[in-house]
Image (cartoon, helix red, strand yellow):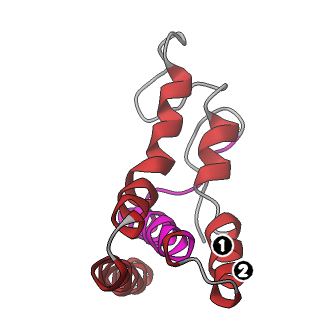
Amino acid sequence: MKRTAWAVAGVFLLAFAVFEAVKHGGWTVGAVLLGLIGPDLTFLAGIGAPPAERGVLPRRVVPFYNAAHHWAGPVVLLVVFSFVASPAAFTLGLAWLAHIVVDRAFGYGLRTADGRQRATA
């Protein structure tokens, strides 16, 4: 049931982000792409790291991964840019939060310091 709720929220946020991109055009299209792809670019910090076991991130990637996959960043963007006119920044927040929520729907979450998946409640 929990993953279903994450999936429903993810579909809503993705639809909202696409709606905003179509409505405003221009920079918002790039903002959607950055929000959807950007958090996973943190994996690039692991280039050259010694291989870890399957499903475990290299230690040096974990802080970047966790920062990019925590809800606080996109929520701050959404709150601030609800009051300050910047459709691209607002849309970036929507897409970024959608990325995080879809990850949760597929069972991916934040990592422990040693790179393993954190246990979810």
In the image, taking residue 15 as reference, residue 80 lies left or right, namely: right
Q: Are marks 2 and 1 in contact (CB under 8 Å)?
A: yes
Q: What segment is highlighted magenta in the picture?
A: 89-112
Dot 1: what SS?
A: helix
Q: Considering depth in this image, is 77 or 112 the residue closer to the camera?
A: 77
Point 57% across, 39% down: residue: 116
Q: Is residue 101 magenta?
A: yes
Could you tell me which residue is drawn at 36 percent across and 87 percent down? 12
The local crowd at label 2, few if under 14, some if 14 to 19, many if 20 or more residues have their Cα within 10 Å, is some
Picture layout, residue 78 above or below residue 35: below
Q: Position of residue 108 (x, y in %)?
A: 45, 56
Quarter location, residue 35: bottom left
Residue 98 magenta-drawn? yes
Residue located beneath label 1 in the image:
77
What is the C-alpha distance between the residues marked 2 and 1? 5 Å
Q: Identify the residue under disc 2.
A: 80
